[in-house]
Image (spheres, rainbow, N blue to C red):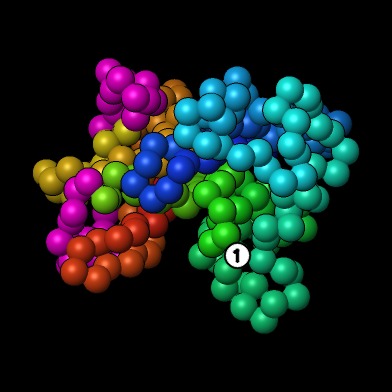
Amino acid sequence: MEFDKIYLVWRKGSGNNRHAVGTLEKQVDGRHFFSYLPAAIELQKTEGFTPYTEFQDLNRSYNGNVAEVFGQRLTKSDRPDVDSFYKFWEVDADKANDKFYLLGKTQGLVPTDNFEFLAEYKMQPGIHFLTELAGLSKRQLEKGLLQIGDTLTFEKEPQNEKDRYAVKVFKNEKFVGYIKKYHSKIFYDAGADKLKLSVKALDQNGTIKRVFIKVSL
């Protein structure tokens, strides 16, 4: 399995820092567990964090149907464009019925809240996943600087005060942003120097707004 832990990540809004507020884990027996992290309580006080609707108690652990509850965020399997959706997100077709796996691979993004599901990927043969370039609102990269298919390089930044697993991304010599927080952890695993980065998709209008990057071995 590419991952057995997914961070429930929240931020106040676009441009704000991402914070892990909980973990969704898959045990060896196939059961799923969800619990909040201590940071969630502090963020509730300082930034107005609101717990996930179905899991309001910040001090308890949840099991049972947690993957199914979170799985309501996923694209419905009977949609005519679902195959294109899976292909974009680098989903293995034989795992398309696994909600835990789909949440990690697609990040469970919806336009109605500020939650993301970021998997803690582990180095293994054939690893591949999609992440997003972070820090673009601060970079203000000009349109056309990046193109689909571009090969990018990376540099670890363990001295970063905000994230000891920070990874900087470059096009040639130009710094363009960071690997999305928590996805960056895999770059600190043994053998991670062999990981390859390429631009999968981007949104640009005057400046580059979003960049999706394929990470592969």
Which of the pair 130/32 is nearer the observer?
Answer: 32
Compared with residue 30, is residue 37 higher up or lower down, i.e. above or below? above
| Image quarter in which the C terminus is found | top left
Compared with residue 130, is residue 46 higher up or lower down, i.e. above or below? above
Q: Is residue 116 left or right of residue 183?
A: right
Local crowd size for mark 1, using a 10 Å CA cut-off: few (<14), some (14–19), many (≥20): some
How far from the left and from the top, in percent, is residue 180? 40, 41
Q: Secondary structure at mark 1?
A: helix
| Residue furthest bottom as drawn | 80
Q: Amino acid at mark 1?
A: Tyr
Which of the pair 110/125 is nearer the observer?
Answer: 110
How far from the left and from the top, in percent, is residue 37? 62, 24
Residue at 79% across, 42% down: 66
Residue at 56% across, 47% down: 115
Q: Is residue 40 left or right of residue 197?
A: right
Residue 85 position by quadrant: bottom right
Residue at 84% across, 34% down: 63
Magenta stretch in the rendered image: 138-166
| Residue furthest left as drawn | 173
How far from the left and from the top, in percent, is residue 211? 34, 57
Residue ID for mark 1 = 86
Please say whether residue 96 is one of the residues in the magenta stretch: no
Compared with residue 114, is residue 160 higher up or lower down, i.e. above or below? above
Which of the pair 142/1 is nearer the observer?
Answer: 142
Q: Is residue 43 left or right of residue 103?
A: left
Prevailing SS of the magenta stretch: loop
